[in-house]
Every structure is written in C-alpha cells, then in structure tokens.
Image (tube, rainbow, N blue to C red):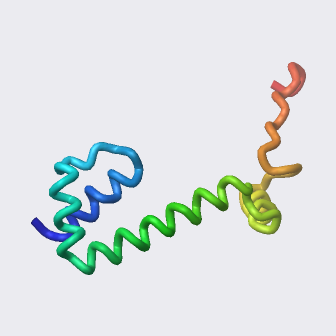
Amino acid sequence: MRCAQFRTALSARLDGEPSGLPGTRLDKHVARCAGCRDWLDRAERLRAQVRAEAADGPAPEWAAGLSARLGLDGPVGAVPEAPRAAER
C-alpha cells in the first residue's frame, strides 16, 4: 500500500469519516513512516487553524472582498428580500 492511500485514510479519520482501514494499521504506518507523520502533523495543525478562524468568523476585509466579487450588497450573511408581488 502506498503512502497516498494511508494519507487518504488519515484525512478521513481527521474528518470523522470511516477511513476504510483498521486504526491500528494506520497508527503502525504513521509510527514507521516519517513522511506520513509529517503530513499528519501538518494536517492536524491546518485543521486546528481553520477551526479557530471559523470560530472567530471571517476577517472583515475577506468578507467584504467576497461580497464584492459576488455582487452582494449589505453585510455578509444578510438574506436578500423576496421579490414583491409586483416585481414577480
């Protein structure tokens, strides 16, 4: 089995999905493979960073830029009003 297959299984495990491999097999591979240990460490740090930033909400500059690119007016997350009967 190649490292790519173990990394796919590790990614699934990080996401709380079935990995398709026994956990002991994944753990043994990571213990023996420096490349996969490094990959898993970076994946765990990235996951923690994304979760922390998601908890804080998007940066105002990022949200404003996204709104502009999408052509939205008003605050991010605002729900557009439904068209009035005369506009339908």
Q: How many marks?
A: 0
Most distant residue in the top direction: 85
Horizontal placement of 35 versus 58: left or right?
A: left
Q: Quadrant of residue 44?
A: bottom left
* Residue under the image location 39 percent in, 45 percent down: 16
Horizontal placement of 49 versus 88: left or right?
A: left
Front residue (pair 87, 23): 23
Across and down, in percent, residue 33 comes to 20, 76
Q: Quadrant of the N terminus?
A: bottom left
Q: Say above or below: 40 vs 57.
A: below
Most distant residue in the bottom direction: 34
Q: Say above or below: 60 vs 22.
A: below
Across and down, in percent, residue 58 comes to 73, 59
Across and down, in percent, residue 32 comes to 18, 74
Front residue (pair 8, 71): 8
Front residue (pair 62, 21): 21
Q: Quadrant of the C terminus?
A: top right
Across and down, in percent, residue 68 comes to 79, 61
* Residue under the image location 89 percent in, 22 percent down: 86
Q: Say above or below: 22 vs 68.
A: above
Q: Quadrant of residue 63?
A: bottom right
* Residue under the image location 49 percent in, 69 percent down: 45
Horizontal placement of 49 versus 44: left or right?
A: right
Q: Quadrant of residue 70?
A: bottom right
